[in-house]
Structures are given as structure tokens and as C-alpha cells.
Image (spheres, rainbow, N blue to C red):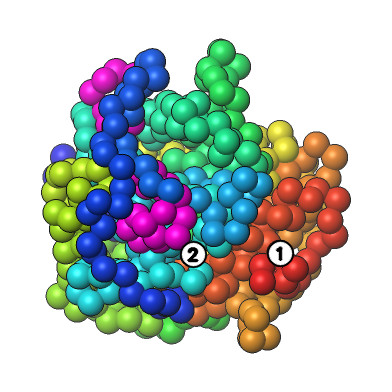
Amino acid sequence: MGRPPGLLAALFLCAGAALGRRLSLDTDGYLGPVQGRSSSPYVFDVRESSSGGPCDPNVRQISGYITLKEHTTRYFFMFFESRRSPETDPMIVWINGGPGFSSMAGMVLENGPCRVANGGKETEINSHSWTTKANGIWIDQPAGTGFSTGPLISSTKRAGELLSQFLHAFFGKYPQYNRRVFLAGESYAGQFIPETLMRLRSDERAGAKPVIDIVGIAIGNGYFSSDRVWRSYPRMAYESGTAPRRVSAAQYNSMVAAAEDCVKETPSCLTGRSSCQALYDRCSKKLIDPISDAKWSIYDLRVKCGPFADCLDDRPIRAYFNNPTVQRAIGTHIGWKSSNENVTAAFHIRELFSTSAEKQLARLLAEGISVLLYAGDQDFLCNWLSVLETAEQLDWPGKSRFASATESPFKLSSSELGATVRTVERLGGLGGLTFARVVNASHMVPQDAPEAALLLMNDFMYRSLASSSPPTAIGLKMLIV
């Protein structure tokens, strides 16, 4: 389609923690054998261990493949029980964005039980893992992402259908974890997650089992609306109030005019009267190139990019996930890379201009699903300004309450500011809505601000579960410590 793969992948992707002891890669023999299991219409090919597995040897873990209904798509996943109380703790389902960015990368770079160390030769325990107080699963999706295989797909709608199948398969096989479930992700997961949850509910109304006990969703630096993203770029580049200024006044004025032109032309793209590809090319040139051409990271405006694509040196994590010992332990044998541009390119360019995610979020809030939208305040691509505007403009019965809610400081254990938060709690049958601007964090918040990310997620989960609890401005320490 002639799209520039680097920048398109970047826009779709708009779409260090305290570490403990190091773990050897010598896990061979700890995990049980690969198991082929049929749970019609799904096939399970997984490894399980009660302890001694890779990444976090102290908890039960399951990893491997679930073959979906058509028997052509196999999704890879890694699951870890909670370090605290797996029998009663909630469940987090994590997906990265892209489309095409592996959740295994998110697991070892951001919020999983371990971080890769020593150039990929070993791992270190992540003390800020989101599994400290929750069970957690990381899923490579859609097909072609990470270790997952199958035909490439072209739409968010199809991604939602397949992820719904996966979740029904997993929770059907492991019903003990179908308890107080939270869907979470970042970047293009702002499209994936609402679509998936709507599809889950549709499938369950049609008789799909089991009914999954979803309480809330959490999305970091999410991509929800092209209009809001285009309009946010000039201010984020010039006068965000949180990140360094990276364009001149003349560039800023040019970007403001370009953003309005992009928004004005979007309806023609969506109705087929004009080319979405041409619109994307024109808008990215005028609104993203001023940052990327100056070699500033579009994921962190504080950082100059080096020689690596997307400013990410993924050599250590590639070495880890392509290590034969690791692959044998987790139940796979294929080559792995952090991002697959073929997956990105397969998605129709019109998907970038979709407006369905915000409508879906509003409907989910009205139906009782709680929502956390958090954003690192140094990210350019899916920046906090666009995410805040999405939160403010969601058309749901709690809109006026959120508009009048005050911003509060969210403190870390050191009493330092971790984020600023605006919250409305669950009321009646409505879900609660929280927006958090995370201080000094990039596109990948749990990587840059691991304590803040963990505290925010735990605070959100346990407030959502205790619907009568009062609003909070700091982490709920009785739940976090």
C-alpha cells in the first residue's frame, strides 16, 4: 500500500524496576512435558509447573499455545499465579499494542514477574510485577505477533473475535482464575480492549461459555481517536507543561493548521471519498516528522534516538526469547522478535481513523465496567493530552461528575509524586472512571515508573472491587504493601 512502515508502525504502536536476585536460564527439567489437550473446539499445547519455572520460579505458571476454533490460529501466552494469594486475588489479562508488538516484550520490559539481565543470558525478579497482588497472563496477539502463528488479519474487529475465543478457551480450561478479571494493555490496546470486551459480551449473549467475570479495564497511553491525537501533537511538542519543547513557534503554528486539516479530512477517508493512505502520509509528515526528523523519540520527548528502530534496543530480549533452553521451558520453538511489521501492515489503514473505541468505552462505563486510563507525561505519540481529552469527552451518564472531579496527587511510598489523578467512583450500576497522568514516564509507563504503575493498578483494581469505598488520592497502602 506504499505506507512508510517505520512511521506507520509507530503510529499504530501509539499503539528500570527494583530488581531482585538473578535467575539462571537452566530451567530444563523444572517444567512438565508439553501437553496436547483437546477442549473442543480448542486445542491446548502447554507446559505447566507448580514451581521452578522461568522468570518467577516461586509461583505456578502455564505457558504455550491455544489453537483457536478455525484450527489455523495459535495464540501463545505466559501465565503466572499471584505471589500473594492466587486462590482469591484478581486476574489481569495483558496485551501490548502495535498491532504486532509482542506482549512477551511487555512482560519482561514492563510489568511482568522478571526483567531480562546480562544481555539476555539471565533474568532478575521484578519486585514491581503486576503479579504481586494478582494472577496475570500475557498474550501474543494477533497472529504473527511474537510467538503466535496463523493467518494475518486486517481489522480490530477480527482481533476482538479471536481474543474473545482465546479468553473463553483459557477460562474454560482454568476456571479457578475466572474471578474479578481486568483487561489491561497499552497503545493500540486502546482499540483492542474495548472491541474485545464488546465481543466477549456479544458471544456470551449468544451462548459462549464461560461467562467471564470482567470488572474493569486499564489502558496505558492508549490510542482512542485520530482526531484527538492529531490535535494534541502541536501542544505536546511545544507547550505541554510536562515534556521539553521540541519545535519552534513557527513549527508549532504550522502543526496547528495541519492538525485541523487532518481532522477536517477524516470523514472523507472513512466514507471512502478520499484515500486514508494519502491522508495518513500527509498528516504524519506534518505532525510526526518534526519530532522524528530531529531524532527525538516519539515515545519519550526527553530522549534522542540512537541507531535502533523505534529507539528500542531489543537485542537482550531477543537473545532471551530465542534461547533454545528458554523456548524449551516455555513450550515453543519458533523465532521471536519484539515487533512484526507484517502484522502492522496487514491492518487496513482506515483502522487508524476509527472512532468506535470511545463509543465502546462510554457504553462499557454505562454498563458497569470500571475504566483506568493512565498516560506517561513524556510520550509524544499517544500523549496524555489526547488521553485526558478522551476521558473528558466520553459520552456516558457519569460525564458531568468526571468533569467536576478535582485532580489529586498520587503519592509513592517515598511520598514523592507519582501521578496526578482524577477519579469518579462506581455509582449505582455505572462503572468508575480514573485518569492518571504519570510523572516522568514515557509511552511504556511500567518500565519508567514501575512503582507508580503498580500502585495505580492495584489501587484501581481494589477500588473497583469495593464499590462502596470512598475516593482516594494516594495508593491504598493496606492493599499495596
Q: CA distance from mark 2 to mark 1?
A: 15 Å
Q: Residue 478 location in percent, x, y?
A: 75, 68
Q: Amino acid under label 2? A: Ser
- Among numbered discs 2 and 1, the one appearing first in the sequence: 2
Residue annotated with mark 2: 129
Residue neighbourhood size for the residue with mark 1, other residues' Cα within 10 Å, grouped as few (<14), some (14–19), many (≥20): few
The residue sitting at 49% across, 64% down in the picture is 129
Residue 108 figure quarter: bottom left
Q: Residue furthest front?
A: 29
The residue sitting at 40% across, 61% down in the picture is 56
Residue 248 figure quarter: bottom left
Residue 63 drawn in magenta: yes
- Residue range (magenta): 51-79
The residue sitting at 46% across, 55% down in the picture is 59
Q: Residue 466: in sight, yes or no?
A: yes
The residue sitting at 74% across, 55% down in the picture is 463
Q: Amino acid under label 1? A: Leu
Residue annotated with mark 1: 479
Residue neighbourhood size for the residue with mark 2, other residues' Cα within 10 Å, grouped as few (<14), some (14–19), many (≥20): many
| 99 horizontally vs 209: left or right | left
Q: Residue 340: in sight, yes or no?
A: no
Give the SS element for disc 2: loop
Report if the CB atoms under discs 2 and 1 are less than 8 Å apart.
no
Residue 346 figure quarter: top left
Give the SS element for disc 1: helix
- Residue placed most toward the observer, 275 or 336: 336
Q: Residue 216 location in percent, x, y?
A: 63, 45
- Residue placed most toward the observer, 37 or 468: 37
